Amino acid sequence: MAYKRVLLKLSGEAFGGGRVGVDPDVVASIARQVAEVVSAGVQVAVVVGGGNFFRGAELQQRGMDRDRADYMGMLGTVMNCLALQDFCEKAGIATRVQTAITMGQVAEPYIPRRAERHLEKGRLVIFGAGSGMPYFSTDTVAAQRALEIGAEVLLMGKQGTDGVYDSDPRTNPDAVMFDELTYDEFLARDLKVADATAISMARDYALPMVFFNLDTEGNIARAVSGEKIGTTVHA
Ligand code: UDP
């Protein structure tokens, strides 16, 4: 394995298998892949998205106040965390969920030093409820958590896409995927696969990012082993 400590961002879309809610078969498959990497001795922390439940921006377009809609989005991520926790424990690894919005019955509060201690003990740490603040995305939280816990790389697991393309491959059959990209190129092209706040935070603190496809079984281990998959974003 190329890395000792990684932050893995799992998009909420992947958890739903393309639909609203959680698809247990999909989550079980992701959990097995995560457990394989943790069992190999890599320290793994996960930030889980919530796009399979609610996105604040979409609810806002349909008439809701943005901040309340964003809180709904954050709560959605917690359901994904619990599903992932369940299947990871069934796959044989110890886990802890920490949430940025306190909910003592279901998870620990976000305590970075404690999260690091869990990682040192070989536990998977799953971060939920985003940053606890509206107007942010879980991509940005993933960059922030990666920096705070000292992860060497931010692995961006995506659904339905192999990496970063110059245009949307779902609508443009001629879209070309980048193997590598600098932070500045990413921002200059205004690519939508991650939000600009996350990219600029990674750039400012020299955190490498790898975008890869979660749908391909074994890709999490490939990304952690340093194999060239997807798109690497760096300085
Ligand atoms: N969200 C938020 N603050 C955060 C993280 C997330 O308000 O720090 C809300 C926001 O509404 C977002 C939703 O939670 O649309 C789900 O997160 P995201 O869209 O990042 O999930 P993903 O696209 O990765 O599935």
Image (spheres, grey):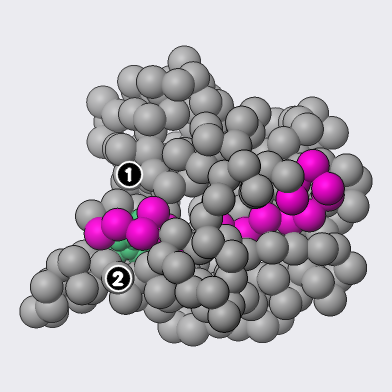
Asked if the beta carbon under badge 2 is closer than 8 A to the nearest atom of ligand 1, the reply is yes
* Camera-side residue of 23 and 126: 126
Q: Secondary structure at mark 1?
A: loop
Amino acid under disc 1? Asp
Amino acid under disc 2? Tyr
The residue positioned farthest toward the top in the image shown: 235
**Residue occupied by mark 2:** 71
Direction from residue 38 to residue 98 in the image, left or right:
left
Question: Could you tell which of marks 2 and 1 lies nearer the N-terminus?
Answer: 2
Magenta extent: 118-134
The number of discs equals 2
- Where 167 falls versus 62 (above or below)? above
Query: Which residue is at 70% across, 81% downward?
Result: 25
Assign the N terminus to one quadrant of the image. Answer: top right
- Is 133 in the magenta? yes
Query: Which residue is at 38% across, 38% downward?
Result: 198
Asked if the beta carbon under badge 1 is closer than 8 A to the nearest atom of ligand 1, the reply is yes
Residue 162 seen in the current view: no
- Where 105 falls versus 163 (above or below)? below
Q: Give how far apart the Cα atoms at labels 2 and 1 are.
A: 18 Å
Direction from residue 28 to residue 83 in the image, left or right:
left
Q: Secondary structure at mark 2?
A: helix
Residue 64 seen in the current view: yes
Quadrant for residue 76, please give it.
Answer: bottom left
Whole-percent x and y of residue 92? 89, 68
Mark in the foreground, 2 or 1: 2
* Camera-side residue of 215 and 35: 35
Whole-percent x and y of residue 193? 39, 47
Query: Which residue is at 45% across, 68% downward?
Result: 102
Numbered badge on residue 195? 1
- Where 148 falls versus 83 (above or below)? above
